[in-house]
Image (spheres, grey):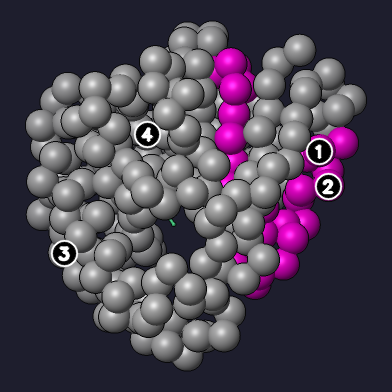
Amino acid sequence: MKLKNVVPWGRNLTEYRAMGLYTDADKYKKILGCGDGPASVNVELTHLGINITSIDPIYQFNKKQIQQRVQETSMLVSEQLRQNRDDFIWKNISNVDELISLRLNAMQEFLEDFESGKREEQYQHQELPKLSFNNKEFDLAWSSHFLFLYSEHFDFVFHKKAILEMLRVAKEVRIFPLLDLKNEKSPHLEGILSFLQESGYIFEIQKSDYEFQKGANEVLKIWHK
Ligand SMILES: C[S@@+](CC[C@H](N)C(=O)[O-])C[C@H]1O[C@@H](n2cnc3c(N)ncnc32)[C@H](O)[C@@H]1O
């Protein structure tokens, strides 16, 4: 992985809650965040005493390298958001400046925690579709803004392997959003749902309170039988 090809962009705990990935009922669970990147969800939950581990390929880099990449990309992302304003719903967040500041705050919180958290193995350099954890080591594994969103970059086989691997290490899997970067339903979604059904998993698509990318307001929850 080359850091220059990554757009590090991280959300906070309030947003993970709104997406339906985390609720107070999960507070005694052992949680695995897949692709949490520079989100502040890990540090915020850790401060609340919740057991969470995050994995992401960007954790192979050091704080300075990630910080520099965050700075480089925030200008670019801000420009893209201004150009594609209509693809987003400006309700909870009213404009691009407010959004950039929210994201930069979340990423700063992550960056301040990153080095000590990496030593504690709260942040681990691992990547889907292969994880080092034991079977059902976690109660819950989630993906926010990685699976389905990057459907053009990661094919159906990758999605199937990644979701199966998350189901191997966790009792429940949650994924948000179900749309791709073009704001269209992920081309892999129907195939994944059929595969889950055929393989005997239980799943549900639930409405979430979060909708920033237009139409991205559903979370997929999957359980073992
Ligand atoms: C758009 S960011 C989302 C960050 C965070 N989950 C959030 O919602 O704020 C997508 C993340 O997926 C990570 N990623 C890319 N390839 C991955 C892989 N094979 N396994 C796990 N994460 C990956 C990227 O490094 C990046 O941090």
Q: Amino acid at mark 2?
A: Glu
Reply yes or no: does residue 93 show up in magenta: no
Disc 2 packing (10 Å; few <14; some 14–19; many ≥20): few
Q: Earlier in the sequence, mark 2 or mark 3?
A: 3
Work out how far the residue at label 2 is from the one at label 1, CA to CA, in angstroms.
5 Å
Percent position of residue 6, x then y: 37, 60
- Locate the C terminus by quadrant: top right
- Closest to the observer: 131 or 94? 94
Q: Secondary structure at mark 4?
A: strand
Q: Quadrant of residue 94?
A: bottom left
> Which residue is label 3 attached to?
68
Quote the CA–CA distance across marks 1 and 3. 39 Å
Tag 4 and tag 1, C-beta contact below 8 Å = no
Residue contact between numbered discs 2 and 4, judged by CB atoms under 8 Å: no
Asked if labels 1 and 2 touch by Cβ distance under 8 angstroms, the answer is yes
- For mark 2, what is the residue? 190
Q: Earlier in the sequence, mark 3 or mark 4?
A: 4
Q: Which residue is mark 1?
A: 193
Please give left or right for residue 117 compared with residue 50 in the image.
Answer: left
Q: CA distance from mark 3 to mark 4?
A: 20 Å
- Tell me the tag on residue 55: 4
2 or 4: tag closer to the N-terminus = 4
Q: Earlier in the sequence, mark 1 or mark 3?
A: 3
CA distance for labels 4 and 1? 25 Å
x%, y% of residue 114?
A: 16, 40
The magenta stretch spans which residues?
A: 167-194
